[in-house]
Image (cartoon, helix red, strand yellow):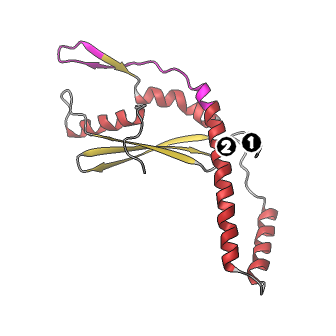
Amino acid sequence: MIALQKTPAQVVNLPSTNQATQVLTMLERVLTAPEFDIERAERLWAMQKEVRAEHAKSVFIAELSELQANIPAIKRQGQIKNNSGVVQSTYAKWEHINEAIKPVLQAHGFALSFRVQQEGTKIVVTGVLSHRDGHSETTVIELAPDTSGSKNAPQAVVSAISYGKRTDRKSTRLN
């Protein structure tokens, strides 16, 4: 079993110039050796990539577990009103969610980003949670433009995107 060691966000584990030179020297020797077997080297490289990916995923899961325990409750300050002006429901605004979670994400080595596409009449919002060790996971939601109220066409799209960023629903489509 691999022991997970926490690395402070300020520390970046880059190889030193000396280490990089040693690796390049070793590669040069291996690649120029008469008995060099490209197929074997490709298999070893693929195996190393798998080991690194598994390690990155393990670290991601461990850090995510700690991260979730530190996510603050976010006050629902947005309001949805009916035509009479009566509040039907409340929600947390994306700007408040982002402000609250950004420092916690950073402290645990995470970054959250979004990709937005339009496919026909649907708005597709893809959330990407990435960890500094290289593993990332995505979730996707497809939404119709939010034409409620008196929104114009651009506002309807932006409203759907905002909803897609803050929703806690499960993916409706997998990549």
Q: Amino acid at mark 2?
A: Val
* Residue position for label 2: 59
State the residue in front, 104 or 17. Answer: 104
Q: Secondary structure at mark 1?
A: loop
Alpha carbon distance from label 2 to label 1:
7 Å
* Residue 4 numbered mark, or none: 1
- 69 on left or right of 7: left
Q: Amino acid at mark 1?
A: Leu
Mark 2 and mark 1 residues within 8 Å of each other at the beta carbon: yes
State the residue in front, 171 or 19. Answer: 171
Please tell me which residue is depicted at 70% across the width and 74% down the height of the picture. Answer: 41
In this view, 137 is above or below 16: above
At which x and y percent is residue 96? 45, 26
Q: Is residue 69 magenta?
A: yes
In this view, 35 is above or below 124: below
Please tell me which residue is depicted at 20% across the width and 39% down the height of the picture. Answer: 153
Magenta stretch in the rendered image: 67-88
Please tell me which residue is depicted at 70% across the width and 68% down the height of the picture. Answer: 44
Dot 1: few (<14), some (14–19), or many (≥20) neighbours within 10 Å? few
Farthest residue, direction front: 1
In this view, 82 is above or below 55: above
Q: Secondary structure at mark 2?
A: helix
Please tell me which residue is depicted at 77% across the width and 43% down the height of the picture. Answer: 3
* Residue 17 numbered mark, or none: none
